[in-house]
Image (cartoon, coloured by chain):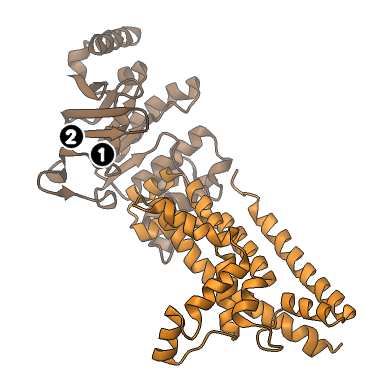
């Protein structure tokens, strides 16, 4: 996987103007974008997914050009094959777990799933150990269950990149620790490259093969795992090294 | 008092007029509401005000506007007459137009609020999952806004049933053709037929209460 982002955009809201100027590329299995809230990491993720249209620049995924302002290329979100798990999961509240996960498999004029689609959904639910929740609605699920449903829905149409927006921040601390390892296992299982954004240094320590640090709409530092801390270090030492690295980057 | 001609005929006519007006208002109201709620364009607020205007204007004023527009010498009426030989004045179709104009803001306002209440995150989620804009609307936006739209539509039906002023000006009060319940009540009182007025008032009240109870139930959300 190779993702190359070089974008700039200006966002205006009533009382402030935000200028994003993000340039980075990544080629590892798990890339973590780290930064405080308001540093531009969410905007960057939305631009990669095609939900936001930068003023200038390019976005490439492998050998595909997803966005090129100069050449007038802007692939619509539905054709990018980039999956996006939102911070609040954005499960459709009016649809059951099965209909949520099967959503990408049905056309709008025939929302009922056919037998093949139902089988694919069942396989996906089994992979995330939520088969028993098939008929439940999102309002009845816990945070951890919602996350599993959101991941199953994102991965069912076999995208070429998975974007995770603060995937662990909505979970309680105990579950968060477990989910970090679970995320890595699932990533391995589906063999899909992942870009995660977070403001938690522990996520960086546990997940990142490569870290990109954002500050005030700019990339201030990037580093591969080996450059950030030694392979021989472990546990608390790793966390300390990561925190030092991030603190340096944030100035 | 003859039940079939004095009560049943105006009741059926009223339901027919209100039903057709509601269908018309539903299609146009939802479309305009979606346009205003989900798109930025010049004159958006002016359009919103214009769409709400029938709510605050006296029905007789609206009726007068409709006569100017739809009458034999009106802009639209003249064209309809010359091109197709259609005349809307003093017909039940004219009553439908009058009721639709008066009831329109109820659907439009409710639908706009319902669309604005739909979190755009859900629409974005559908887009990244491969949905076209049509699919986003049909599978996500509309189902999530459905209750508010339906509640507004039922109110519009109730309003269309009770329409008096604009209808009287555009369609008149021809028994069996354009005399709806509310106009029949007025005529009965004017003619001193108290029994009939009482009965018509009772029928109208029951139908209106049923509609309001129904829309009240729909307003309660299911997913919270």
Q: Which residue is mark 2?
A: A7
Q: Residues within 10 Å of mark 2 (few under 14, many from 20)?
A: many
* Marks 2 and 1, how far apart at CA: 9 Å
Pick the residue in front: B62 or B5.
B62
Q: Colour of chain A?
A: brown
Q: Position of residue A66 (x, y in %)?
A: 18, 45
- The chain whose colour is orange is B
Q: Which residue is mark 1?
A: A47
Locate residue A244: give its quadrant.
top left
Same chain assignment for discs 2 and 1: yes
What chain is tagged by disc 1?
A
Q: Residue at x 47, y 28 (%)?
A: A170
Q: Residues within 10 Å of mark 1 (few under 14, many from 20)?
A: many
| Res. A210 visible in picture | no
N-term mark: 2 or 1:
2
Secondary structure category for the residue under label 1: helix
Q: Position of residue B83 (x, y in %)?
A: 39, 90
| Res. B160 visible in picture | yes
Locate residue B105: give its quadrant.
bottom right
């Amino acid at each position: 996987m190779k993702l190359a982002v070089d974008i700039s955009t200006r966002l205006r809201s009533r009382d402030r103007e935000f200028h994003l100027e993000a340039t980075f590329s990544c080629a590892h299995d798990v890339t973590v974008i780290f930064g405080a809230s308001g540093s531009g990491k969410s905007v960057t993720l939305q631009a990669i997914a095609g939900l936001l249209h930068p003023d200038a620049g390019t976005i490439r995924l492998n050998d595909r050009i997803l966005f090129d302002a100069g050449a007038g290329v802007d692939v619509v979100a539905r054709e990018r094959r980039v999956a996006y798990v939102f911070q609040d999961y954005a499960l459709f509240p009016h649809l059951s777990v099965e209909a949520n996960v099967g959503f990408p498999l049905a056309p709008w004029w025939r929302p009922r799933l056919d037998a093949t689609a139902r089988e694919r959904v069942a396989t996906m639910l089994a992979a995330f150990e939520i088969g028993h929740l098939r008929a439940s609605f999102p309002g009845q699920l816990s945070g951890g269950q919602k996350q599993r449903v959101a991941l199953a829905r994102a991965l069912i149409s076999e995208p070429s990149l998975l974007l995770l927006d603060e995937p662990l921040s909505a979970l309680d601390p105990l579950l968060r620790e477990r989910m970090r390892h679970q995320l890595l296992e699932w990533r391995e299982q589906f063999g899909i490259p992942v870009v995660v954004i977070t403001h938690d240094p522990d996520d960086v320590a546990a997940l990142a093969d490569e870290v990109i640090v954002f500050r005030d709409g700019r990339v201030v530092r990037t580093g591969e795992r080996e450059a950030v801390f030694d392979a021989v270090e472990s546990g608390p030492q790793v966390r300390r090294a990561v925190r030092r690295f991030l603190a340096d980057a944030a100035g | 008092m003859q039940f079939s001609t004095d009560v049943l005929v105006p009741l059926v006519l009223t339901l027919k007029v209100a039903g057709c007006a509601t269908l018309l208002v539903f299609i146009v109201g939802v479309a305009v509401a979606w346009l205003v709620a989900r798109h930025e364009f010049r004159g958006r607020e002016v359009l919103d005000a214009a769409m709400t205007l029938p709510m605050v204007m006296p029905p007789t004023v609206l009726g007068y506007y409709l006569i100017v527009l739809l009458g034999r010498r009106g802009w639209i009426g003249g064209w309809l007459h010359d091109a197709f030989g259609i005349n809307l004045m003093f017909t039940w179709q004219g009553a439908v137009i009058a009721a639709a104009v008066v009831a329109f803001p109820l659907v439009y306002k409710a639908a706009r609020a319902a669309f604005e209440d739909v979190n755009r995150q859900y629409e974005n989620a559908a887009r990244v999952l491969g949905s076209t804009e049509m699919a986003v609307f049909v599978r996500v936006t509309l189902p999530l806004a459905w209750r508010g739209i339906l509640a507004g539509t039922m109110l519009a039906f109730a309003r269309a049933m009770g329409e008096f002023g604009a209808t009287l000006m555009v369609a008149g009060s021809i028994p069996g053709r354009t005399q709806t319940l509310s106009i029949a009540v007025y005529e009965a009182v004017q003619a001193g037929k108290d029994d009939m007025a009482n009965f018509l008032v009772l029928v109208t009240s029951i139908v209106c209460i049923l509609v309001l109870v129904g829309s009240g139930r729909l307003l309660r959300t299911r997913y919270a």
